Image: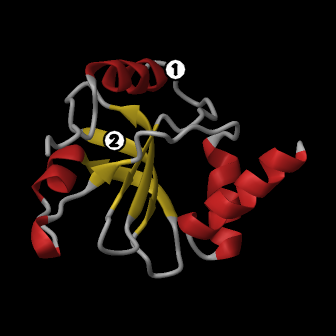
């Protein structure tokens, strides 16, 4: 089985383009997750260094936070059963990062926020 890269060149380009437009409430471009745990990251920007992502991070402690995180560190993580951090290949959203952050904080996790926002999207709100 071939591992899916955390960022494709196209995704990296979209993230860099977002970073070039500061003070904007961007839509998350990529969702990364721990298949063996609660860790989830939504990225909206990628710095010029090609490593520093900005977005919403939820490590499973009930307090999702906006901030920066390292792509290299996420790629280097080795999880139980030979697993590693993965990219949700089917992730898409109609909501900007601020809505994700507010919903995740209220719900206590990014996973709960994803369910709430999917319901809102299906309801057309």
Q: Work out whether residue 110 or residue 56 is closer to the camera in this orientation and state it.
A: 110
Q: Is residue 125 visible?
A: no
Percent x, y of residue 66: 49, 56
Residue 93, percent from left and from top: 63, 39
Q: Is residue 27 left or right of residue 18?
A: right
The first of marks 1 and 2 along the sequence is 1
Helix, strand, or loop for circle 2? strand
Residue 121 in the image, given as x and y percentages of width and height? 79, 45
In the rendering, which numbered label is found on residue 21? 1
Quarter location, residue 89: top left
User: Are the two marked residues, 1 and 2, in contact with CB atoms closer than 8 angstroms?
Assistant: no
Please say which color scheme the image uses.
secondary structure
Residue labelled with disc 2:
53
In the image: residue 74, left or right of residue 109: left
Give me the residue at 34% from left, 18% from top.
Answer: 10
Residue at x 15% of width, y 46% of height: 72
């Amino acid at each position: 089985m071939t591992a899916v890269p955390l960022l494709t060149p196209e995704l990296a380009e979209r993230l860099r383009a977002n970073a070039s437009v500061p003070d904007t409430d961007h839509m998350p471009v990529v969702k990364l997750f721990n298949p063996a745990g609660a860790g989830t990251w939504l990225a909206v920007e990628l710095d010029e260094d090609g490593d520093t992502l900005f977005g919403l991070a939820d490590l499973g402690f009930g307090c999702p936070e906006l901030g920066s995180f390292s792509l290299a560190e996420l790629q280097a993580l080795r999880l139980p059963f030979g697993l590693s951090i993965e990219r949700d290949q089917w992730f898409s959203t109609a909501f900007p990062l601020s809505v994700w952050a507010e919903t995740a904080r209220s719900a206590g996790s990014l996973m709960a926020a994803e369910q709430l926002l999917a319901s809102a999207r299906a309801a057309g709100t």
